[in-house]
Image: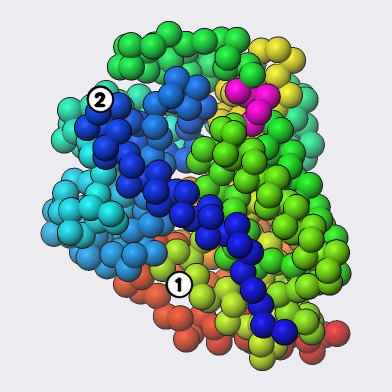
Amino acid sequence: MTYEPLAISAEAMGYQRDWTRSLRSRIENGAKFAFVNADTPHEIFHTMDMPVVVNQWWSSVIAAKQLSTYTLDRGAAMGFHDSLAKYSAMGVISALDGDPDKQPWGGLPDPAILCARQSSDDQQRLFQMYADKAGARLALLHSPAAAENLNDWWVRARDDWEALYGTARLDLMQAQITDLIADVEEITGRRFDHEGFGAYMEQIEKQELIFEEASRMIAAAERMPVRIGEQIPNVMIPQWHRGSDWAVGHAERFRDAVGERITAGRAVVEDERVRMMWIGAGLWFDTKFYTAFEEEFGAVFAWSMYLPFAANGYVRRSKGDYLRALAARVVTMNEQLHQAPWANAWLVKQARDYRIDLAVVLVPEADRPSGYATNFITEDLREAGVEVVEIHADMVDARKWNGARAKADVIDGIRRVRGAT
Protein backbone atom coordinates (compact mmCIF):
# COMPACT_ATOMS: atom_id res chain seq x y z
CA MET A 1 0.00 0.00 0.00
CA THR A 2 1.40 3.41 -1.00
CA TYR A 3 1.77 5.88 1.82
CA GLU A 4 -0.55 8.86 1.50
CA PRO A 5 0.34 12.07 3.33
CA LEU A 6 -2.18 13.59 5.69
CA ALA A 7 -4.26 16.23 3.96
CA ILE A 8 -3.74 18.60 6.88
CA SER A 9 0.06 18.57 6.42
CA ALA A 10 -0.22 20.68 3.29
CA GLU A 11 -2.67 22.92 5.14
CA ALA A 12 -0.14 23.62 7.91
CA MET A 13 2.67 24.41 5.50
CA GLY A 14 0.38 26.55 3.39
CA TYR A 15 -0.76 28.47 6.44
CA GLN A 16 2.81 29.34 7.43
CA ARG A 17 3.81 30.23 3.88
CA ASP A 18 0.81 32.55 3.46
CA TRP A 19 1.38 34.08 6.90
CA THR A 20 4.98 34.88 6.04
CA ARG A 21 4.09 36.34 2.67
CA SER A 22 1.42 38.52 4.28
CA LEU A 23 3.89 39.84 6.85
CA ARG A 24 5.38 42.37 4.46
CA SER A 25 2.01 43.90 3.65
CA ARG A 26 1.20 44.05 7.37
CA ILE A 27 4.47 45.91 7.96
CA GLU A 28 3.69 48.30 5.13
CA ASN A 29 0.35 49.01 6.83
CA GLY A 30 2.04 49.92 10.10
CA ALA A 31 2.52 46.60 11.91
CA LYS A 32 5.81 45.83 13.65
CA PHE A 33 7.27 42.35 14.14
CA ALA A 34 9.76 40.60 16.39
CA PHE A 35 12.66 38.36 15.29
CA VAL A 36 13.30 35.91 18.12
CA ASN A 37 15.09 32.72 19.05
CA ALA A 38 13.05 29.57 19.64
CA ASP A 39 13.71 29.45 23.40
CA THR A 40 12.36 32.93 24.19
CA PRO A 41 8.91 33.94 25.52
CA HIS A 42 7.01 34.29 22.25
CA GLU A 43 3.84 34.47 24.31
CA ILE A 44 4.47 38.13 25.21
CA PHE A 45 4.53 39.13 21.55
CA HIS A 46 1.56 36.96 20.62
CA THR A 47 -0.67 38.25 23.37
CA MET A 48 0.09 41.83 22.28
CA ASP A 49 -0.67 41.01 18.63
CA MET A 50 2.92 41.49 17.49
CA PRO A 51 3.94 39.07 14.70
CA VAL A 52 6.88 36.79 15.50
CA VAL A 53 9.45 35.29 13.13
CA VAL A 54 11.49 32.53 14.77
CA ASN A 55 15.17 32.59 13.89
CA GLN A 56 15.62 28.81 13.77
CA TRP A 57 12.47 28.37 11.69
CA TRP A 58 13.75 30.94 9.23
CA SER A 59 17.08 29.06 9.03
CA SER A 60 15.19 25.82 8.34
CA VAL A 61 13.31 27.49 5.47
CA ILE A 62 16.56 28.84 4.02
CA ALA A 63 17.99 25.31 4.15
CA ALA A 64 14.85 23.70 2.71
CA LYS A 65 14.99 26.18 -0.19
CA GLN A 66 18.56 24.94 -0.85
CA LEU A 67 20.01 28.36 -0.02
CA SER A 68 22.25 27.35 2.88
CA THR A 69 25.40 26.96 0.81
CA TYR A 70 25.02 30.44 -0.67
CA THR A 71 24.14 32.00 2.68
CA LEU A 72 26.96 30.41 4.67
CA ASP A 73 29.50 31.15 1.92
CA ARG A 74 28.33 34.76 2.03
CA GLY A 75 28.79 34.67 5.79
CA ALA A 76 32.40 33.56 5.33
CA ALA A 77 32.96 36.39 2.85
CA MET A 78 31.49 38.81 5.41
CA GLY A 79 34.00 37.60 8.02
CA PHE A 80 31.93 35.13 10.06
CA HIS A 81 33.95 32.12 11.21
CA ASP A 82 32.81 28.61 10.31
CA SER A 83 32.44 27.44 13.90
CA LEU A 84 29.28 29.43 14.51
CA ALA A 85 26.17 27.45 15.39
CA LYS A 86 24.64 27.54 11.91
CA TYR A 87 21.06 26.92 13.03
CA SER A 88 21.10 30.11 15.08
CA ALA A 89 23.42 32.14 12.82
CA MET A 90 22.20 31.51 9.29
CA GLY A 91 18.98 33.51 9.52
CA VAL A 92 20.91 36.48 10.87
CA ILE A 93 23.60 36.17 8.18
CA SER A 94 20.90 36.08 5.51
CA ALA A 95 19.35 39.25 6.89
CA LEU A 96 22.71 41.01 7.07
CA ASP A 97 23.41 40.01 3.45
CA GLY A 98 20.02 41.40 2.49
CA ASP A 99 19.78 40.02 -1.06
CA PRO A 100 16.04 39.48 -1.70
CA ASP A 101 16.79 37.11 -4.59
CA LYS A 102 18.68 34.80 -2.22
CA GLN A 103 16.14 34.71 0.60
CA PRO A 104 12.89 32.74 0.84
CA TRP A 105 9.89 34.70 -0.45
CA GLY A 106 12.04 37.78 -1.00
CA GLY A 107 13.31 37.95 2.57
CA LEU A 108 12.02 39.68 5.67
CA PRO A 109 11.39 43.36 6.32
CA ASP A 110 13.29 44.91 9.22
CA PRO A 111 12.06 43.81 12.67
CA ALA A 112 11.22 46.32 15.39
CA ILE A 113 12.71 44.19 18.17
CA LEU A 114 15.01 41.19 18.42
CA CYS A 115 14.97 38.81 21.37
CA ALA A 116 17.47 36.09 22.28
CA ARG A 117 18.18 34.03 25.33
CA GLN A 118 21.95 33.93 25.83
CA SER A 119 22.21 30.15 25.81
CA SER A 120 25.38 30.20 23.69
CA ASP A 121 28.34 32.55 23.43
CA ASP A 122 27.61 33.97 19.98
CA GLN A 123 23.94 34.92 20.30
CA GLN A 124 24.31 38.35 21.84
CA ARG A 125 26.80 39.50 19.19
CA LEU A 126 24.82 38.12 16.24
CA PHE A 127 21.60 39.66 17.45
CA GLN A 128 23.34 42.97 18.22
CA MET A 129 24.63 43.15 14.64
CA TYR A 130 21.16 42.47 13.22
CA ALA A 131 19.56 44.99 15.59
CA ASP A 132 22.09 47.63 14.55
CA LYS A 133 21.38 47.01 10.86
CA ALA A 134 17.62 47.11 11.35
CA GLY A 135 17.63 50.02 13.79
CA ALA A 136 15.73 47.72 16.14
CA ARG A 137 15.52 47.30 19.89
CA LEU A 138 17.42 44.36 21.37
CA ALA A 139 16.18 42.28 24.31
CA LEU A 140 18.73 39.78 25.66
CA LEU A 141 17.63 37.32 28.34
CA HIS A 142 20.07 35.69 30.76
CA SER A 143 20.66 31.94 30.89
CA PRO A 144 21.83 31.11 34.44
CA ALA A 145 22.78 27.54 35.23
CA ALA A 146 20.62 25.33 37.40
CA ALA A 147 21.79 24.77 40.97
CA GLU A 148 20.70 21.13 40.81
CA ASN A 149 20.23 18.70 37.94
CA LEU A 150 17.06 16.65 38.29
CA ASN A 151 16.56 14.06 35.57
CA ASP A 152 12.80 13.67 35.92
CA TRP A 153 12.16 17.27 34.89
CA TRP A 154 9.34 16.28 32.49
CA VAL A 155 7.32 15.08 35.48
CA ARG A 156 8.14 17.83 37.94
CA ALA A 157 8.02 20.75 35.50
CA ARG A 158 4.23 20.74 35.23
CA ASP A 159 3.41 21.45 38.87
CA ASP A 160 6.61 21.60 40.91
CA TRP A 161 8.47 24.04 38.69
CA GLU A 162 9.35 26.46 41.48
CA ALA A 163 11.44 23.83 43.25
CA LEU A 164 12.69 22.30 40.01
CA TYR A 165 14.09 25.47 38.47
CA GLY A 166 14.87 27.45 41.62
CA THR A 167 13.35 30.66 42.90
CA ALA A 168 16.38 32.85 42.10
CA ARG A 169 16.45 31.76 38.46
CA LEU A 170 12.70 32.21 38.08
CA ASP A 171 12.85 35.63 39.74
CA LEU A 172 15.47 36.74 37.21
CA MET A 173 13.58 35.36 34.22
CA GLN A 174 10.26 36.85 35.35
CA ALA A 175 11.90 40.25 35.88
CA GLN A 176 13.35 40.13 32.38
CA ILE A 177 9.98 39.11 30.93
CA THR A 178 8.45 42.11 32.71
CA ASP A 179 11.08 44.34 31.09
CA LEU A 180 10.26 42.75 27.73
CA ILE A 181 6.59 43.59 28.22
CA ALA A 182 7.53 47.24 28.75
CA ASP A 183 9.57 47.18 25.52
CA VAL A 184 6.69 45.74 23.52
CA GLU A 185 4.22 48.18 25.05
CA GLU A 186 6.42 51.07 23.96
CA ILE A 187 6.91 49.71 20.45
CA THR A 188 3.28 48.80 19.79
CA GLY A 189 1.52 51.47 21.82
CA ARG A 190 -0.63 48.74 23.42
CA ARG A 191 -1.07 47.93 27.08
CA PHE A 192 -0.39 44.42 28.35
CA ASP A 193 -3.68 42.76 29.33
CA HIS A 194 -2.95 40.47 32.29
CA GLU A 195 -6.42 38.91 32.27
CA GLY A 196 -6.31 38.28 28.53
CA PHE A 197 -2.82 36.85 28.91
CA GLY A 198 -4.11 34.31 31.43
CA ALA A 199 -6.83 33.15 29.05
CA TYR A 200 -4.25 32.91 26.28
CA MET A 201 -1.91 30.79 28.44
CA GLU A 202 -4.78 28.42 29.17
CA GLN A 203 -5.29 28.03 25.42
CA ILE A 204 -1.63 27.10 25.02
CA GLU A 205 -1.94 24.44 27.69
CA LYS A 206 -5.00 23.06 25.92
CA GLN A 207 -3.04 22.87 22.66
CA GLU A 208 -0.06 21.12 24.24
CA LEU A 209 -2.23 18.52 25.96
CA ILE A 210 -3.86 17.72 22.60
CA PHE A 211 -0.39 17.12 21.18
CA GLU A 212 0.34 14.91 24.18
CA GLU A 213 -2.69 12.80 23.26
CA ALA A 214 -1.38 12.48 19.71
CA SER A 215 2.08 11.51 20.95
CA ARG A 216 0.71 8.78 23.19
CA MET A 217 -1.45 7.45 20.37
CA ILE A 218 1.51 7.25 18.01
CA ALA A 219 3.75 5.66 20.66
CA ALA A 220 1.17 2.98 21.41
CA ALA A 221 0.26 2.24 17.79
CA GLU A 222 1.14 -1.24 16.56
CA ARG A 223 2.73 0.36 13.48
CA MET A 224 3.64 3.97 12.82
CA PRO A 225 0.62 5.77 11.30
CA VAL A 226 2.41 8.96 10.17
CA ARG A 227 5.95 9.84 9.13
CA ILE A 228 7.99 12.21 11.29
CA GLY A 229 8.38 14.40 8.20
CA GLU A 230 4.68 15.08 8.63
CA GLN A 231 4.63 15.13 12.40
CA ILE A 232 7.11 18.00 12.44
CA PRO A 233 5.17 20.65 10.43
CA ASN A 234 1.87 19.63 12.02
CA VAL A 235 3.37 20.32 15.44
CA MET A 236 5.92 23.08 14.94
CA ILE A 237 3.88 25.43 12.77
CA PRO A 238 1.09 25.50 15.37
CA GLN A 239 3.78 25.95 18.01
CA TRP A 240 4.99 29.13 16.30
CA HIS A 241 1.37 30.36 16.56
CA ARG A 242 0.62 28.64 19.84
CA GLY A 243 -2.57 29.49 21.64
CA SER A 244 -4.29 30.98 18.57
CA ASP A 245 -7.64 29.59 17.45
CA TRP A 246 -6.00 28.23 14.31
CA ALA A 247 -3.20 26.50 16.25
CA VAL A 248 -5.53 24.83 18.76
CA GLY A 249 -7.86 23.76 15.97
CA HIS A 250 -5.01 22.37 13.92
CA ALA A 251 -3.72 20.39 16.89
CA GLU A 252 -7.16 18.82 17.22
CA ARG A 253 -7.32 18.03 13.49
CA PHE A 254 -3.87 16.45 13.60
CA ARG A 255 -4.74 14.29 16.62
CA ASP A 256 -7.98 13.19 15.00
CA ALA A 257 -6.29 12.39 11.69
CA VAL A 258 -3.72 10.26 13.50
CA GLY A 259 -6.50 8.47 15.36
CA GLU A 260 -8.36 7.75 12.13
CA ARG A 261 -5.26 6.18 10.62
CA ILE A 262 -4.65 4.01 13.66
CA THR A 263 -8.28 2.86 13.73
CA ALA A 264 -8.15 2.05 10.02
CA GLY A 265 -4.93 0.06 10.50
CA ARG A 266 -2.99 2.24 8.09
CA ALA A 267 0.76 2.55 8.52
CA VAL A 268 3.85 4.16 7.06
CA VAL A 269 5.29 0.68 6.50
CA GLU A 270 3.00 -2.34 6.25
CA ASP A 271 5.78 -4.73 7.28
CA GLU A 272 7.35 -2.61 10.00
CA ARG A 273 10.41 -4.38 11.39
CA VAL A 274 12.60 -1.62 12.85
CA ARG A 275 11.42 1.46 14.70
CA MET A 276 13.81 4.43 14.76
CA MET A 277 14.09 7.78 16.50
CA TRP A 278 15.77 10.91 15.14
CA ILE A 279 17.61 12.87 17.84
CA GLY A 280 18.34 16.48 17.01
CA ALA A 281 16.76 19.24 14.98
CA GLY A 282 15.38 18.37 11.56
CA LEU A 283 17.70 17.67 8.64
CA TRP A 284 16.09 20.54 6.80
CA PHE A 285 17.92 20.38 3.47
CA ASP A 286 17.34 16.62 3.02
CA THR A 287 14.07 15.60 4.68
CA LYS A 288 13.75 12.69 2.21
CA PHE A 289 16.46 11.02 4.29
CA TYR A 290 13.77 10.04 6.79
CA THR A 291 11.96 7.83 4.28
CA ALA A 292 15.02 6.17 2.72
CA PHE A 293 14.86 2.98 4.81
CA GLU A 294 11.18 2.12 4.67
CA GLU A 295 10.74 0.04 1.54
CA GLU A 296 13.87 -2.12 1.66
CA PHE A 297 14.27 -2.60 5.40
CA GLY A 298 10.84 -1.99 6.90
CA ALA A 299 12.55 0.64 9.06
CA VAL A 300 10.55 3.74 9.92
CA PHE A 301 11.42 6.89 11.82
CA ALA A 302 8.74 6.99 14.49
CA TRP A 303 10.04 9.72 16.79
CA SER A 304 11.44 13.23 16.69
CA MET A 305 11.63 15.67 19.58
CA TYR A 306 8.98 18.05 18.30
CA LEU A 307 5.77 16.21 19.17
CA PRO A 308 6.55 14.85 22.67
CA PHE A 309 8.29 18.06 23.72
CA ALA A 310 5.09 20.01 23.03
CA ALA A 311 3.62 18.90 26.35
CA ASN A 312 6.78 18.12 28.33
CA GLY A 313 8.45 21.41 27.43
CA TYR A 314 5.45 23.74 27.55
CA VAL A 315 2.81 22.63 30.06
CA ARG A 316 3.32 24.59 33.27
CA ARG A 317 0.21 24.65 35.45
CA SER A 318 0.10 28.30 36.45
CA LYS A 319 -1.71 28.29 39.80
CA GLY A 320 -3.00 31.65 38.58
CA ASP A 321 0.47 33.21 38.22
CA TYR A 322 0.82 33.15 34.46
CA LEU A 323 3.98 35.24 34.15
CA ARG A 324 5.71 32.97 36.64
CA ALA A 325 4.55 29.93 34.67
CA LEU A 326 5.93 31.49 31.49
CA ALA A 327 9.27 32.05 33.21
CA ALA A 328 9.28 28.36 34.15
CA ARG A 329 8.57 27.44 30.53
CA VAL A 330 11.57 29.22 29.03
CA VAL A 331 14.19 29.23 31.79
CA THR A 332 15.75 25.88 30.82
CA MET A 333 14.07 25.05 27.50
CA ASN A 334 17.16 24.62 25.33
CA GLU A 335 19.04 22.70 28.01
CA GLN A 336 16.23 20.19 28.46
CA LEU A 337 16.27 19.43 24.75
CA HIS A 338 20.02 19.20 24.26
CA GLN A 339 22.11 19.17 27.43
CA ALA A 340 23.08 16.43 29.87
CA PRO A 341 21.65 15.20 32.15
CA TRP A 342 18.22 16.53 31.18
CA ALA A 343 18.21 15.51 27.51
CA ASN A 344 19.61 12.00 27.79
CA ALA A 345 17.31 11.01 30.68
CA TRP A 346 14.27 12.29 28.75
CA LEU A 347 15.37 10.57 25.54
CA VAL A 348 15.77 7.21 27.26
CA LYS A 349 12.22 7.59 28.58
CA GLN A 350 10.96 8.48 25.10
CA ALA A 351 12.78 5.54 23.52
CA ARG A 352 11.04 3.17 25.94
CA ASP A 353 7.63 4.78 25.40
CA TYR A 354 7.95 4.54 21.61
CA ARG A 355 9.55 1.06 21.68
CA ILE A 356 12.57 2.27 19.73
CA ASP A 357 15.08 -0.18 18.26
CA LEU A 358 17.55 2.26 16.71
CA ALA A 359 18.37 5.89 17.57
CA VAL A 360 20.02 8.09 14.96
CA VAL A 361 21.80 10.94 16.73
CA LEU A 362 22.68 14.08 14.80
CA VAL A 363 25.98 15.52 16.08
CA PRO A 364 26.33 19.14 14.86
CA GLU A 365 29.95 19.71 15.77
CA ALA A 366 29.86 23.50 15.39
CA ASP A 367 26.63 23.83 17.37
CA ARG A 368 27.74 23.47 20.97
CA PRO A 369 24.30 23.91 22.59
CA SER A 370 22.92 21.09 20.42
CA GLY A 371 25.99 18.89 20.37
CA TYR A 372 27.45 18.83 23.87
CA ALA A 373 25.34 16.01 25.27
CA THR A 374 25.55 13.56 22.38
CA ASN A 375 28.15 11.29 24.02
CA PHE A 376 25.99 11.04 27.14
CA ILE A 377 22.88 10.43 25.02
CA THR A 378 24.57 7.65 23.08
CA GLU A 379 25.93 6.00 26.22
CA ASP A 380 22.61 6.08 28.09
CA LEU A 381 20.58 4.83 25.12
CA ARG A 382 22.93 1.91 24.58
CA GLU A 383 22.76 1.08 28.27
CA ALA A 384 18.96 1.03 27.88
CA GLY A 385 19.27 -1.52 25.05
CA VAL A 386 18.82 0.84 22.10
CA GLU A 387 21.16 0.58 19.12
CA VAL A 388 22.70 3.97 18.22
CA VAL A 389 24.14 5.50 15.06
CA GLU A 390 25.81 8.92 15.24
CA ILE A 391 25.78 11.16 12.18
CA HIS A 392 28.24 14.04 12.27
CA ALA A 393 26.50 16.72 10.25
CA ASP A 394 24.62 19.99 10.65
CA MET A 395 20.86 20.50 10.51
CA VAL A 396 21.07 23.42 8.05
CA ASP A 397 24.56 23.31 6.51
CA ALA A 398 24.42 21.25 3.32
CA ARG A 399 28.03 21.89 2.33
CA LYS A 400 29.57 18.96 4.22
CA TRP A 401 26.63 16.58 4.05
CA ASN A 402 27.48 13.12 2.78
CA GLY A 403 24.07 11.52 2.32
CA ALA A 404 25.43 8.25 0.96
CA ARG A 405 27.74 7.80 3.96
CA ALA A 406 24.96 8.67 6.42
CA LYS A 407 22.56 6.21 4.79
CA ALA A 408 25.20 3.48 4.86
CA ASP A 409 25.77 4.07 8.57
CA VAL A 410 22.06 3.83 9.32
CA ILE A 411 21.74 0.67 7.23
CA ASP A 412 24.57 -0.88 9.24
CA GLY A 413 22.66 -0.01 12.40
CA ILE A 414 19.45 -1.52 11.03
CA ARG A 415 21.30 -4.72 10.20
CA ARG A 416 22.71 -4.88 13.72
CA VAL A 417 19.19 -4.55 15.12
CA ARG A 418 17.78 -7.18 12.81
CA GLY A 419 20.70 -9.50 13.52
CA ALA A 420 19.91 -9.29 17.21
CA THR A 421 16.22 -10.16 16.80
The quadrant of the image that shows the N terminus is bottom right
Provide residue 154's location: percent of width, then percent of height: 74, 39
Q: Nearer the observer, disc 1 or disc 2?
A: 2
In the image, residue 336 above or below residue 362? above
Q: How many marks?
A: 2
- The residue identified by callout 2 is 30
Q: For the magenta stretch, what is the residue range?
A: 200-204
At x 25%, y 61%, the residue is: 72
At x 85%, y 64%, the residue is: 263
Kind of residue sitting beneath label 2: Gly
Q: Residues within 10 Å of mark 1 (few under 14, many from 20)?
A: some
In the image, residue 257 above or below residue 288? above
Quarter where residue 362 is shown: bottom right
Gap between marks 1 and 2 measured at Cα: 37 Å
Kind of residue sitting beneath label 1: Asp
Provide residue 231's location: percent of width, then percent of height: 63, 59
Provide residue 215's location: percent of width, then percent of height: 75, 52
Element on which disc 1 rests: loop
Residue 146 in sight here: no
At x 39%, y 11%, the residue is: 190
Residue 60 in sight here: yes
Element on which disc 2 rests: loop
User: Looking at the rendered structure, which numbered label has been put on residue 345?
Assistant: none
Q: Are marks 1 and 2 in contact (CB under 8 Å)?
A: no
Provide residue 57's location: percent of width, then percent of height: 43, 49
Quarter where residue 244 is shown: top right
- The residue identified by callout 1 is 286
Quarter where residue 245 is shown: top right
Residue 229 painted magenta: no
At x 62%, y 69%, the residue is: 5
- Mark 1 or 2, nearer chain start: 2
Closest to the observer, 269 or 360 = 269
